[in-house]
Amino acid sequence: MEALFNEWLWQERYWLPPGIGWKDTEMKEDEGHFPLPRDLICTLPLALVFIVLRFVFERIIAIPLSRFLGVKDRIQIQVSPVPELEAFYKYKSRRPSKSEVVGLVKQCDLTERKIQTWFKNRRNQDRPSKTKKFCEESWKFAFYLIAFTAGLSSLINTSWLWDQKECWRGYPKQPVSDTHYWYYMLEMGFYLSLILTFSRDVKRKDSKWQLMHHITTVFLIAFSYCANYVRVGLLVMLLHDSSDYILELAKMFHYAVWKRTSESLFVVFAVVFLVTRLVVLPCRLIHTTLLVSMEFYQPFFGYYFFNALLLVLQVLHIIWGRDIVRMAFKFLFSGKIEGDERSDTESEDDEEGEGGDAEDEENRMNSKLTPLANDSVLNNLTNQRSVNNRLPKAR
């Protein structure tokens, strides 16, 4: 198996520039550590450790913190058990069509309205609570903040942080320090843990994009390590962590209904995100991997594959950046932020749970009708019902 692996996958032309072989990358013990694929094996147990740490963190730190900040869960209506409807809900559809509702009426001897209400309450019953959402975001906030702080402190004195040409000087024979090695392993282990727990996490409007982002990130980290694109990889990870922890903190305060704090943090996040992901990343890092790197070596398979992954990541950033700009315009014209369209807007079921809830719907309608409520003409139309009956046109 090892011979087959070395023959088909671990070929020099895939991982090294033309004219350079594996012997050229060998280092003595005093020269440092050269990244090897077997180093990545430890990321899987690290992912399992992260899952356990998350479980402990949420119960010991996140839940008490949510209560301290005032996170309150809405009371959910428990539906009465109806075996026919429960079976249809689990095995066929959570949103029956009108014809399916008519068929269920015959089976359950209930009215269409009662069946529709049952399905709505049943969906809301499965809706994740605000406490669960808060715990998920607080865990991500803790990791991103620690990762950004540790990454910045380890890179602040490196030459390639300030001059990206240094990323390629001496490539591919570039040693990796123990600090940067563990930074790489922990980042990859964390994203692997997010993929493993994806099915149990809160489903959001952009969950598919988030999953694609996590998978792309894992491939990007793994391949960049094997091809010794470690220096550029460190800069890309640091750039991402610089805005992610701000977004998670804004979501935490959003669930705690600290409106002004949440909106202020969202504005800060929007600025940092747009600058780092749509300006610095393409103009500095992608530019150096696409163009500057060719001043030091000729392109090879790893060059094309790594840049392709970076471009996929950049497309996702453009999609999220569009949504963030849309939110910024809403904030400028309405004076408030209704939600983070990048990842805080939940999926369709969640929207019904929060947006379709009767109390929320009433509050939204009241806020929209408040200016009209002071209109004397509207008051006359609503108070004088006898006049409305005689004047259908005015009604």
Image (tube, rainbow, N blue to C red):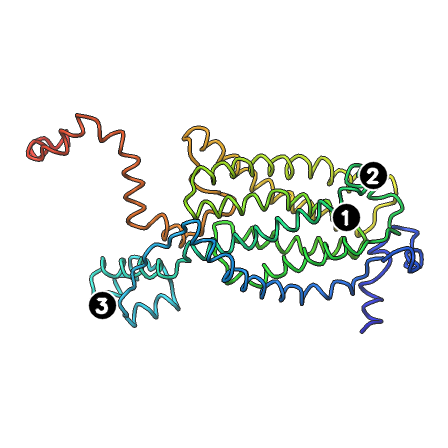
Q: Which mark is residue 106?
A: 3
Q: Position of residue 114 (x, y in %)?
A: 23, 60
Question: What amino acid is labelled 2 in the image?
Answer: Lys
- Relative vertical location of residue 297 with respect to residue 133 in this rendering, above or below: above
Quadrant placement of the C terminus: top left
| Residue pictured at 14% horizontal, 31% vertical | 381
Q: Quadrant of residue 387?
A: top left
* 335 up-or-down from 254: above or below: above
Q: Answer above or below: position of 336 versus 216.
A: above
The image quarter containing residue 295 is: top right
Q: Is residue 317 left or right of residue 333?
A: right
Residue depicted at x 39% and y 58%: 127
| Disc on the earlier residue, 3 or 1 | 3
Marks 1 and 2: CB-CB under 8 Å? no
Identify the amino acid type marked 3. Lys
- Cα–Cα span, label 1 and label 2: 19 Å
Which numbered tag is attached to residue 304? 1
SS at mark 2 in the image: helix
Q: Give the label, 1 or 2, closer to the camera.
A: 2
Give the number of the mark in front: 2 or 3: 2
Q: Position of residue 228 (x, y in %)?
A: 81, 53
